[in-house]
Image (cartoon, rainbow, N blue to C red):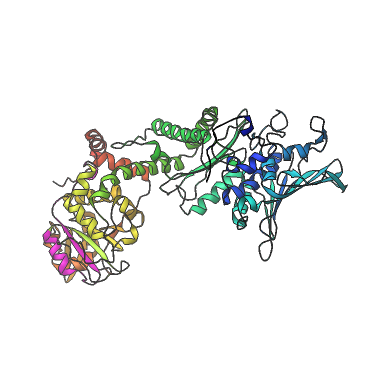
Amino acid sequence: MATKKESYTGADIQVLEGLEPVRKRPAMYIGGTDSTGYHHLLWEILDNSVDEVINGFATTVEVTLHKDGRSITVVDNGRGIPVDIMPKYKKPAVEVILTTLHSGGKFEQGNYVHSGGLHGVGSSVVNALSRKLVVEIKLDGKKHVQNYARGRATTPLKVDGPCRGTGTSVTFEPDPEIFGEKLKFDPETVRERLEAKSYLHKGMTVIWKDDTAHPHTHVTYKHDGGIAEYLTKVVAERQKPMVPPGSATFYHSRDNGVRLEASLAWTEATDEHIRSYVNGIPTNLGGTHEGGLRGAVVKAVRNYIETHNLTPKGVTLTAEDIREGMVAILSTYVVEPQFQGQTKGRLNNPEVTAQVDGVLRPALEKWLNDNKSIAEAVVARIILAARAREASRAASQAISRKTAVSHRLNLPGKLADCSSTDPGLSELFIVEGDSAGGSAKQGRDRRTQAILPLRGKVLNAEQASTDKVTTNKELQDIVSALGCGIGTDFDITKLRYGRVFLLMDADSDGHHIATLLLTFFYRHLRPLIESGTIHIAQPPLYRVDIGKETYWALDEPDRDRIIREKTKGNAKPNIMRFKGLGEMTPDELKETTLDPKNRMSLRVTIDNPLDTDRLINDLMGKDVSARFRFIMERASEVQDLDV
């Protein structure tokens, strides 16, 4: 049983000398003793070698994971750690660096302009937490070797023969007393970090040797394309195509007072993905440099939208909308970086935000102006994100997803469904009116064709609030019949029909209803249009009988062409104009509009998303002046007005 000590004197104060504090509290220096901390030891040694590359003293870094999976060697062809005796300590400089906290060549300005960290504890912490560590230094034509164990030198620094060139080699094995017996280096984790380093530093050669693999792995990484090439790789890995597909990416480099590189692109993903680095160190927790990047992107895009008068009506663009789908690589170099913790996960330098913003914002604005087609596709994608965000908020609450396999559940009562449950064979005809719906139901192929009649004109999805759209009975019936859900619940794999046809009368009312439906699909179910699912059926407006032959005309010019080409001798054409689909018999509707062998239809596509968004907003939105201007500009083009 422990007893309570009443006195508290100087004798109770414990002083941990040398590297004892590191072994006593390793989490303070490497974040923990799990796999992350285990690998952090390697990153410390690796970053020392990369610092030589960053500052122009080395070109090659080689990493070898030995057969046991626990020991690893990092070699560079840099200047080599100094080996001269330091008078104050009466020890070689390399021994002081490896056995003393807060020692190193990165405190004094001039040795390193940019460094992975200025804590000065990296190498010594690795030494303290290693069961064994061997350093070999090539310097002044001699090879110097010294052994260490758990933070202490076990041999003096010795000259081990002559050598060519310069450089440093560090071999170490993390101490199982600290990390346990089970932990080992993960080859894939190490390989990914090394490959990323090769992208971040143009011209650097990285050699990766994995002796744990069978056969042994020996890979060389060298990417002269730098982070622009890295960005393309990251986008490909995420499997979300760029917007527009195959477009060029933004890249900017600056080394005049502010040294940074940045590359970015927009994709069809619904999140933003940023990989940031400071002096070659990955900052997984972000920081002030990422804040500068985000601010620059938002400001540049807003300025482009305002300058080119592309501000959408009826929706407010947020910073999140602008950055949705963005993939970016940011590599900055800071002379005296202030990291959050020894593991360097986050940059805290407040001045870096303005520096990054000041460099990237004008560069990105210029890139957008120089690449108008890319810029407009990006803006269209941003507007879509904003509208989807506002639409999904209430849509996901109002309508739950209907799955394709639940073919007979939760379907509208007026839907005449088909017997096929294969979406590849099934078609849905959304028909105007009950009378036309009756003819369509009788003329259809019941095995593959479903009919959904609509009563009157549907709600204008451009003017109505999201709540009204998602609670509108006609639109609810369409979503229920399709089965793919809406808003955040949308899943195109649940779509019950491979083709959806809008079947309306061939008059102005029919065109209006089709436009209202297209507006709904564009705003709330746009992937159906993009996948080529939506079609506009083309029922004839005229029946032309010439002798014993019957012809069908889509409109007046088509009617006149048929009469001109098919009339022979004294035969007089008998012309009948359909006032609506309800006047057609089921057989006529089947022959002209439903039968895949004879029917004509238009597939709905989006050629220019930005123009399409603007046109729908002008024609269907709440702003009357836009429609008035459109009508006045095109009034002279009208020949026949259908009232």
Residue 480: where, in percent of width, then height? 23, 58
Residue 424: where, in percent of width, then height? 32, 67
Residue 442 highlighted magenta (yes or no): yes
Instruction: Kindly give the residue lying farthest to the right in the view shown.
Output: 161
Q: In this view, does 214 lie above or below 327?
A: below
Residue at 24% across, 53% down = 399
Write down the region rendered in magenta: 434-463
Q: Is residue 454 visible?
A: yes
Total number of numbered discs in the rendering: 0
Residue 419 highlighted magenta (yes or no): no
- Relative to the observer, which residue lies in front, 386 or 124? 124
- Relative to the observer, which residue lies in front, 423 or 155? 155
Q: Can residue 570 be seen in this view?
A: no
Q: Is residue 525 above or below residue 449?
A: above
Q: Quadrant of residue 349?
A: top right
- Relative to the observer, which residue lies in front, 349 or 248? 349
Asked if residue 270 lies left or right of residue 387, the reply is right
Residue at 23% across, 45% down = 461
Q: In which quarter of the image is residue 304?
A: top left
Residue 556: where, in percent of width, then height? 20, 54
Residue 583: where, in percent of width, then height? 11, 61
Asked if residue 420 lies left or right of residue 9, the reply is left
Q: Quadrant of residue 137?
A: top right
